[in-house]
Image (spheres, rainbow, N blue to C red):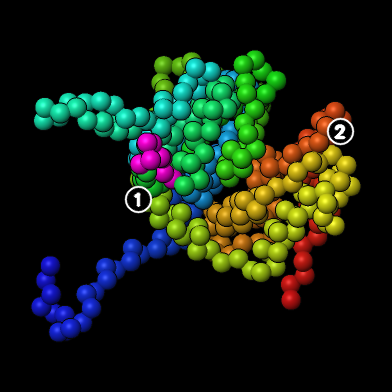
Amino acid sequence: MDTTSAPAGAAPATPAATPRLAPEAFAERAAAIEREVGKVIVGQRELVRQTLTALLANSHALLEGVPGLGKTMLIRTIGEVIDCTFNRIQFTPDLMPADITGTNILVEEGGKRIFRFQPGPIFANLVLADEINRATPKTQSSLLEAMQEHQVTVARQRFPLEPPFFVLATQNPLEMEGTYPLPEAQLDRFLFKVMVPFPSEEDLIAIIDRTTGADAPTTTKVADAAEIVEMQRLARAVPIAPHVTAYAVSILSATHPDQPRAPELVRDYVRYGGSPRGAQARVTGGKIYALLDGRFNVSIDDIRAVALPALRHRVILNFEGEAEGITPEAIVRSILDSVTPPAVE
């Protein structure tokens, strides 16, 4: 290293920080990703937007819907559009935790037998956990440390996961055969739970035309791992006004039946409300929605726009709520109707 230009006794110069991505470039790059994904995924714009938001928030997303709606195809397409490592894990009842995290294997080296860690499929930038609720709770729990700490511990050794690290999980409705409910602690680690709706008849026609013709749709890579990390950094730098943060906290408080803000529907049918991660999810998601809209500040509407995917899996109904057929979506909507935004001082 050349030090001739540094004054004697001066501390070594620190490397220049990576220039931050401009907000305009953020929106352009995100639009390019959505556009490429749209070449394969017909319609479902809100589904693609919410999934991409979870990725840009440096978090994870859970997609729920009946089989055949394109959940796996969406995630594989995102893996093709972003130039990063991609692994798929097919969850089955006989899948073991070591099949996900990896294990130590015995190898011969220099005439000696030693244990060497063999990484599992969790070591990738983008991990598809397909049909995650078909595995046993023991196997499901093997993802907890990786999703929260971005590391894996095997035999008292810690192995960090390279950024960006994004788990996109799919699950079938619990009433279907061979499913296990995800523990609340694991559900809470997903930034969003995104419901995959059945496509309209117009979209079905487009799907059939694309999938039964001679020409298969193709995509091109429009971003790499380093660019995704820079977009994640920019998202965290978006400012948010105190009254907007207070509104996000008020909504979270209203999910708890013992809080004064809770509406009647929450008091009657909710057992547990959302954790602080619920407010974090709405603030982070609101920041990304603002950037996608070309703004560098978060509005009340941004917080409201991400309320359903951020809270629907964090609101736990009581027995009466389940018996009456109350849905978490109905609970969240009643909260949005009852909690008024604070006045700007």
**In the picture, which quadrant includes the C terminus?**
bottom right
In the rendered image, residue 73 lying in the magenta stretch gets the answer no
Total marks in image: 2
In the rendered image, residue 154 lying in the magenta stretch gets the answer yes
Q: Earlier in the sequence, mark 1 or mark 2?
A: 1
Give the x, y percent position of residue 329.
75, 39
Q: Residue at x 50, y 23 (%)?
A: 91
Within the image, what quadrant is residue 302 found in? bottom right
Within the image, what quadrant is residue 338 found in? bottom right
Q: Is residue 206 above or below residue 335?
A: above
Observer-nearest residue: 11 or 263?
Answer: 11
Give the x, y percent position of residue 148.
50, 45
Secondary structure predominantly adopted by residues drawn in magenta:
strand
Q: Which residue is mark 2?
A: 320
Q: Residue furthest bottom?
A: 8
Observer-nearest residue: 32 or 118?
Answer: 118
Give the x, y percent position of residue 114.
22, 30
Q: Residue at x 75, y 43 (%)?
A: 272
Q: Residue at x 88, y 42 (%)?
A: 268
Residue 163 shows in the view: yes
As drawn, is 137 to the left or to the right of 119?
Answer: right
Q: Residue at x 42, y 22 (%)?
A: 216
Q: Is residue 35 above or below residue 102?
A: below
Disc sitting over residue 226 in the figure: 1
Q: Secondary structure at mark 1?
A: helix
Q: Secondary structure at mark 2?
A: helix
Disc sitting over residue 39 in the figure: none
Residue 38 shows in the view: no
The magenta region covers 150-157
Circle 1 packing at 10 Å, graded few (<14), some (14-19), many (20+), is few
- The amino acid type found where label 1 is placed reads Ala
Depth check, mark 1 against mark 2: the one in front is 2
